[in-house]
Image (tube, helix red, strand yellow):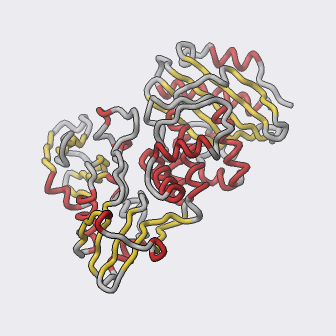
Amino acid sequence: MGQVTQQQTNSFFNDSAVATGHVGISIYEPATGKYLYNYNAEKNFIPSSNLKLFSLYAGLKYLSDSLVGFKYFENDTAIFIIPAGDPTLLHIDFKSQPGINFLKNLNKNIYLIDTFKIKAYGSGWSWSDYADYYMAERSALPVYGNTVAFMLNKNRFETVPPPFSSFTLLQNFADSNKETTVLRDFYSNTFTTVQNNQSNETVFTPFITSVALAAKLLADTIHKKVTVINSDALPFNSNNIKAIHSRPVDSLFKPMMFNSDNFFAEQTLLMASNEKLGYMSDGEMIDYLLKNDLKNLPTKPRWADGCGLSRYNLFSPKDLIFILDKLQKDFGLERIKRILPTGGQGTLRGYYENAGGNIYAKTGSISNNVSLSGYLYTKQNKLLLFSVMINNYSGSGRAGRKAIEKFIQEVRINN
């Protein structure tokens, strides 16, 4: 069996990026069922986006092979759309839109059922980040990723979806060294772009969601009227409900993990809830998972959201080892390797460049906290599961990530 040497750990703990923080490490060899190394492995840490490994498990477990774009039932004159939480509907990165094609070809009145009341933000999210791309609102029927794409160019201005261009004030300045920004009013979908005269970029900014706005944007796209109705006034037989599937689930999970997409992770947890519980509730789905599928977690975590934005989340390194082991056992390591980035890819771009194909891992980063958990093939071709978590350190995010990289590379070489 391999080992982690005192020299390796001393080098890591003495790194200036780590020395001021709290550190937890767990390294496990599944072939032997033994831990190579533990340090504060049962203490709780803020996992940041390492939490997405738990949402990934929920999605893999409960979303079958393809995403439900939406559900519906119909009569002779009308069709009634039931939201299913699919975040890829009209998303700019997904060109194939089976649900939109289905609606375009209808010759019936279209009604959108207002079934679910979803809280826009997760528990413990920072309100001041409301206009940042990574904090798109959650909703029952997302459209366009619940963000506006502002395509800024010195010769043209365009938004996707197009209607938002009429709610945007353009401000230009001559200094090309200044950063282009898009500002949004806190209480309304009123935007201001502040761009230099050399702008040539696309900026994504969340909009305030509502079922009425989703219906309007849907209607603008399919060029048909979409009427919102309350589900309480419309009894129906659940046996007559059908589903439109949008795409294979892994086509969502891969960008969710490669790019650490918070919106996809949140919607994955809501979709899993909808399929398993019959309604969308992140809190109740989390409770169900902790009492059932994940009841044997080594420590008792605090799980607050689906993506890891919340500082309320608390998990131990051994909890991360548990979910990594469960993912490979329940769904196969080869599938998980296709979903997670390897060295030089996705959120590992610029890191582990010489370890491509030997490391598959999920990053985590919020201010003063970094973590990395995943699968590592050593020089002797042993498979190790690892989790390294650093909280409350005073260095930069890059410095923390580089310190973890150096440590993990030494583990890989010496085992």
Residue 387 pos. (x, y %): 65, 32
Q: Is residue 194 visible?
A: no
Q: Is residue 401 left or right of residue 160?
A: right
Quadrant assignment, res 408: top right
Above or below: residue 337 compared with residue 3: below
Quadrant assignment, res 197: top left
Who is closer to the viewer here, 345 or 204?
Answer: 204
Quadrant assignment, res 292: top right
Residue 231 pos. (x, y %): 32, 64
Q: Is residue 290 visible?
A: yes
Who is closer to the viewer here, 3 or 129?
Answer: 129
What quarter of the picture does the C terminus occupy? Answer: top right
Q: Is residue 201 left or right of residue 376?
A: left
Residue 18 pos. (x, y %): 56, 18
Residue drawn where x is 60% and y is 49% of the image: 57
What quarter of the picture does the N terminus occupy? Answer: top right
Residue drawn where x is 30% and y is 47% of the image: 206
Residue drawn where x is 78% and y is 29% of the image: 35
Residue drawn where x is 23% and y is 52% of the image: 153
Residue 93 pos. (x, y %): 41, 59
Who is closer to the viewer here, 380 or 76?
Answer: 76
Q: What is the number of callouts on the image? A: 0
